[in-house]
Image (spheres, rainbow, N blue to C red):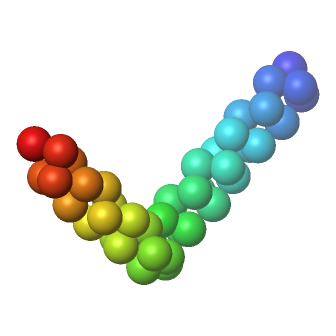
Amino acid sequence: MTQMIRDYLVIAAAIALLAFIIKSWPVVDEVAELLEDAEKAKG
């Protein structure tokens, strides 16, 4: 039982951290734009 709760907390913390990084990291937007430009260049 305790192990299950601990696993759940670890997963929740990882998701929260990932969401925080995505929201607070402008580089993500730049990379997304670069990928879109690359797709347009291919097409």
In screen coordinates, is 7 left or right of 27? right
Above or below residue 4? Residue 35 is below
Q: Residue at x 18, y 45 (%)?
A: 42
In screen coordinates, is 10 left or right of 36? right
Q: Residue at x 89, y 26 (%)?
A: 3
Q: Quadrant of the C terminus?
A: top left
Report x, y in % for residue 24.
49, 78
Report x, y in % for residue 37.
20, 60
Q: Residue at x 26, y 66 (%)?
A: 33
Above or below residue 36? Residue 11 is above
Residue reaching furthest right?
A: 2
In screen coordinates, is 3 left or right of 41? right
The quadrant where residue 10 appears = top right
Whether residue 36 is visible, yes or no, is no
Residue reaching furthest top?
A: 1
Question: 2 or 33, which lies in front?
Answer: 33
In screen coordinates, is 34 left or right of 28? left
